Amino acid sequence: MMYNEEMRTTITIDEDVHEFATIYAQANGITLSNAIGELVRKAKAGQAQAPSINRLANGFPVFPSSGGTVTPEMVKRLEEEEMKGNDAVIAKLNEAVGKALDDETVRKRLLELGSVIPGPAERTPEALAALVKSEIAKWTPVLKPAS
């Protein structure tokens, strides 16, 4: 059955739903009836979009406080964004650390403290990743039973 004119009816809704619909109506300058109609149509259409991720001036990502769901895809997108451009930063840091380790005063102090100073070939990010991986493999069997 189809009607060409508006249908009026009385419904009972929970208080929190009424409050939300009222706020929505006020924010959009529409009646409560129109707000409920819009909200039901949006829910029916399944057009709930993932909340957008904003960034503060310092680049820190901020999720909206709208109560939207943070999806794994959103987290993955952020991780990918964060990794872009990191290669240049890592190379610059690696170069600075290499220079510091080659400085005679720094070397002397590190050796006094009992440090082992890696050679240039052992100072790469890849070498560090391999070292961490081998140390985890070496120490996990020792530490796991203690935990």
Image (cartoon, helix red, strand yellow):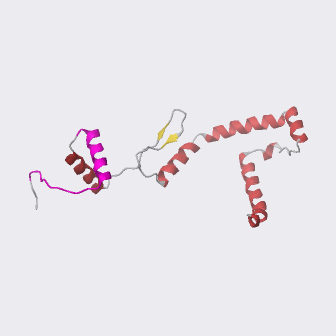
For image coordinates 89% across by 45% down, the residue present is 114
Which quarter of the rendered picture does the N terminus lie within?
bottom left
Between residue 144 and residue 19, name the one nearer to us: 19
| Residue 127 falls within the magenta-colored stretch | no
Which quarter of the rendered picture does the C terminus lie within?
bottom right
Q: Is residue 57 above or below residue 4?
A: above
Is 138 on the left or on the right of 44, as rendered?
A: right
**Residue positioned most to the bottom:** 145
Which range of residues does the magenta coloring cover? 4-29
**How far across and how far down the image is residue 116, in percent?**
86, 46
Q: Quadrant of residue 141?
A: bottom right
Q: Quadrant of residue 103?
A: top right
Q: Is residue 32 above or below residue 109?
A: below
**How far across and how far down the image is residue 58, in percent?**
55, 33
For image coordinates 52% across by 32% down, the residue present is 57
**Residue positioned most to the left:** 4
For image coordinates 85% across by 35% down, the residue present is 106
Between residue 46 and residue 7, name the one nearer to us: 7
Total numbered badges shown on the rendered structure: 0
Between residue 83 and residue 145, name the one nearer to us: 145
**Residue positioned most to the front:** 15
Between residue 9 and residue 95, name the one nearer to us: 9
Is 61 on the left or on the right of 12, as rendered?
A: right
**How far across and how far down the image is residue 66, in percent?**
40, 46
| Residue 18 falls within the magenta-colored stretch | yes
For image coordinates 28% across by 48% down, the residue present is 21
Q: Is residue 112 above or below residue 3?
A: above
**How far across and how far down the image is residue 36, in percent?**
24, 50
